[in-house]
Amino acid sequence: MKEVYQEMQRLLRSGKRFATATVIATRGSTPRNVGAKMLIVGDGSFAGTVGGGCGEAEVWQEAMDALKDGKPRLVTIDLTNDYEEEGMICGGIMDVFIDPGPKGVTEAFLEAVARNEGVALATLVKGPEGEPSVIQVGAKMVVLEDGTFRGHLYDEALDRAIVQESLSALKAERCCTVKALEDIEVFIEVVERRPVLLIVGAGHVAQPVSQIGKLLGFNVVILDDRADYANVERFPEADRIIVAGFVDTLRSFPIDDKTYIIIITRGHRYDDACLREAVRSPAQYVGMIGSRRKVKLIFDHLRQLGILETALERVHAPIGLSIGAETPEEIAVSVMAEIVQVKRGRGSAAAMRACMGI
């Protein structure tokens, strides 16, 4: 989806006409989930996918028709029986909203995505049928995590209600369709903040960790006080590279529960100082590389400094899953596998150390 949003931004800035096709509801087994998006350009080219095959071809044709008449539309793609001849029996139904003129607050939404902010785009996808209505299908609002919003759907009451629904959707990290008033439906498209992978130390292990972290969708930040190590030549995939002191940076860095901290500095003294700062943060994950002996020495020192045992229990050290890793690349795999395990709620540091007898 990141590439789709980037392409949307490029198309908007180039002035090319295009339509968006977004899956807003599914029933049964479908090739794509709610939120899947496809862009269809006026010349017939497209980016993204809503599932491929005949269903996608039907969406493409509807989008081309929408680009001609300028009218948004909600179409139902039935995959249960229509495509047996093509060997594509998915057994489900998709509702796809096609918008031939995404504009206005759409760019504000895309800018928030580019800044890695949690953001919701609420689109009015269905209004009263029959007589002409002042309700505009395709109207949009952008809602940020702090509750600020731009755009307008209908009246003040509906706007306020959709802001609250958008904040709930952001918290749940889930796209949804909301039925409002009597005949109005609003689709809320959610883009959550990418989790931050803060790699403290830019040595040999940090390079494959950064590469795998990027592949897994993390916002990768490299921190080291040596410019010869922390630079774009060694970390071309990193979103941000900080060349500064470890402790001062950790104190000022905006760490929250979407931050995953890996401490792999060049020495025992730096690891100790970094862990002292990180362990008191609200980070979702704190891991430190090192032998069992080194971990015990640092933990004992932090206890002497008054760090609570409950805080130390959160630390994954020795870092990574026990897979017999030896090379920097293998260590990176074990570390990122452990982070995925924690991210999915399937492993605590204390339990892992208990299994290892630490």
Image: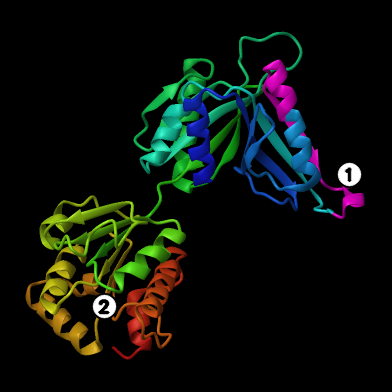
Of 42 and 26, nearer the camera is 42
Question: How many neighbours does mark 1 have within 10 angstroms: few (below 14), some (14-19), or many (20 or more)?
Answer: some
Q: Give the residue displayed 28% in from the left and 56% down from the top.
A: 232
Marks 2 and 1 close (CB-CB < 8 Å):
no
Q: Which mark is residue 282?
A: none
174 vs 101, nearest the viewer: 101
For residue 223, which quarter of the picture?
bottom left
Membership of 111 in magenta stretch: no
Residue 82 — which label? 1
Q: Which mark is residue 289?
A: 2
Place of residue 186 in the rendered image (x, y in percent of width and height, measured from the top left): 59, 29
Whole-Å distance between the Cαs marked 2 and 1?
Answer: 56 Å
- Residue 347 visible at all: no
In the rendered structure, the answer to whether residue 139 lies left or right of residue 71 reads left
Residue range highlighted in magenta: 63-87
Residue 120 image point, x, y percent: 47, 36
Q: Position of residue 344 (x, y in %)?
A: 47, 64
